[in-house]
Structures are given as structure tokens and as C-alpha cells.
Amino acid sequence: MGWLIGGAIVLITFLFSRRAGAVVVALLAVAWVGFWLATDRKSEQEPSNQSVSISANSDPRLCPNPEMPVSVRITNRADKTLQAVSFSLVARQRNSIIYRASHTSDEVIAPGDFFSTCYGLNPLSFAIRTVRYDPRELNWAGETSLTRFASPKPH
């Protein structure tokens, strides 16, 4: 909508005076560059999926319950509070992906803090469902897909 209004203003101004039209185009260009720089800086300050790390392993000391054998640690490396994260829990054997399941955690995690919990395995998430895998023999990892951070409080 803003582009249409700006285009109409430039067109009308050019109809009356080319010099005034050039001035309007220059002012719009300066305004656009200023807006672009302001939003670019803001996006640099916003935390992203890379601000959250997910690690997983099947150490029986961390998760002794055989029904929930995979320990997942979610670490918030951002300077804002993490409100929710969606991630995939992935297991590999050699270079093949054996298991992939999507999870969401709405555990609130303060900046620089972490949260650990144990997860069970969904039999439908294995690539080959007829084979029984020992979770301790697989290489586990977490892959962050979506994050939601707390909004800054208005002053």
C-alpha cells in the first residue's frame, strides 16, 4: 500500500514539475534506506533458532527409565527468555538417519540457562519399524526448528 501511495505522489509531482519530482524521489529513497537500516539492525538484535541449542543422548545415568531413554538438554544462549521451542529429535546409525520425531517444549528458560528432561521413543518415528534398536547404540542429536522468545516489556 505504501508503494502505491509513494508511486502516486511521485507521478503527480512529476506531472507538475520534474525538479520537484526528483526531490520527492530523493526523499523517498532516503526514507527507504533509513527504514531498511533500522529494520536490519533490529533483526541483528533479535534472537534466532541459532540462539538455542538442543543436545541429546541416551546415557542411562541421566535417564534411568527404559520407557524414556533419551536425555534432551535445551540451552538458551540468547539474551531474552525462551518461552517455547520446537525441535526434532534425531538418531543416526553410521551415516543413516534411523529415527526422527518432532517435539515442542514450553518450558520457560532464562537467558544463559538450560532445561533437561527425558523423552520416550515413538515406534512410528523409526525409519525401519520392524527392527528393534538399542537407543544407547545410536548417535542422538536435536535440531531446532522454531523458537518463541519473550517480548520486551514496554517502558
Image: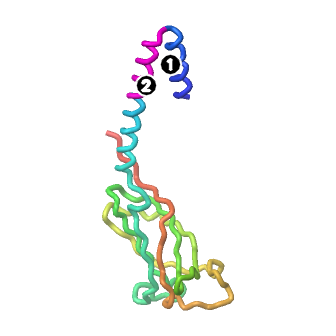
Magenta stretch encompasses residue 25: yes
Question: Where in the figure is residue 62, as x and y percent of width and height?
Answer: 40, 85
Residue 96 image-quadrant placement: bottom right
Q: Which residue is mark 1?
A: 10
Q: Contact, CB < 8 Å: mark 2 with mark 1?
A: yes
Residue 48 image-quadrant placement: bottom left
Q: Is 64 in front, or is 10?
A: 10
Q: Which residue is mark 2?
A: 28
Residue plotted at (37% across, 68% down): 75
Q: Is 79 in front, or is 2?
A: 2
Q: If the image is split into quadrants, where does the C terminus sit? A: top left
Number of marks: 2
Q: What mark, if any, has residue 62 been given in the picture?
A: none
Amino acid residing under circle 2:
Leu
Question: Where in the figure is residue 34, as x and y percent of width and height?
Answer: 37, 33
In this picture, which residue range is highlighted in magenta? 17-30
Report helix, strand or loop for mark 1. helix
Q: Is 27 in front, or is 111?
A: 27
Amino acid residing under circle 1:
Val
Residue plotted at (32% across, 56% down): 79
